Image (cartoon, rainbow, N blue to C red):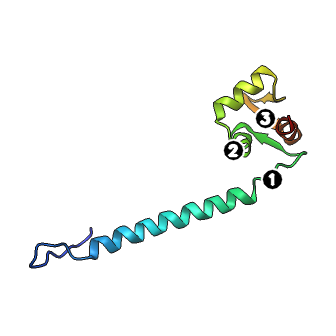
Amino acid sequence: MIWTVVLRSGAVAPMIWTAVLRGGAVASLALAVFELYDQFYREIRPNRIYSVDEAARLLRLERRSLVRLIRQGTIPGMKVSGHYRVLGQSLLDFLKR
């Protein structure tokens, strides 16, 4: 619960704004850490097998779009236990086109 103090002029004391700013700072920091992590692991390794979610993130595509490309044969992939898997070299070849 955030306590606020109403001043004589009717204005709300800065306590609530401090809480809002702190929350925004935490969210900004979390986003920056996620982007740094994403940038560090964005390198596509040719011999690694990627899930559709990982491959879509690396190619900056929606998951549905990547599944469609796999089903069309544009990107080679195989279904393992009901989930598509894609070799890193296939992703690199797709990017070179």
Q: Quick one: SS at disc 2? A: helix
Which one is in front in this view, the residue at disc 2 or the one at disc 3?
A: 2
Residue 64, compared with residue 36, is above or below; it is above
Q: Are marks 1 and 2 in contact (CB under 8 Å)?
A: no
Question: Quick check: 36 above or below 13?
Answer: above
Position above or below: 97 against 26: above
Residue 80, horizontal then vertical, whole percent: 78, 30
Q: As shown in the figure, which amino acid type bears the numbered disc 3?
A: Arg
Label drawn at residue 85: 3
Name the mark on residue 57: 2
Which residue type does callout 2 highlight? Arg
Q: In the structure shown, which secondary structural element does the residue marked by tag 1 occupy?
A: loop
Circle 3 SS class: strand
Mark 1 or mark 3, earlier in chain: 1
The one of 16 and 48 positioned closer to us in this rendering: 16
Residue 16 placement, left or right of 28 = left
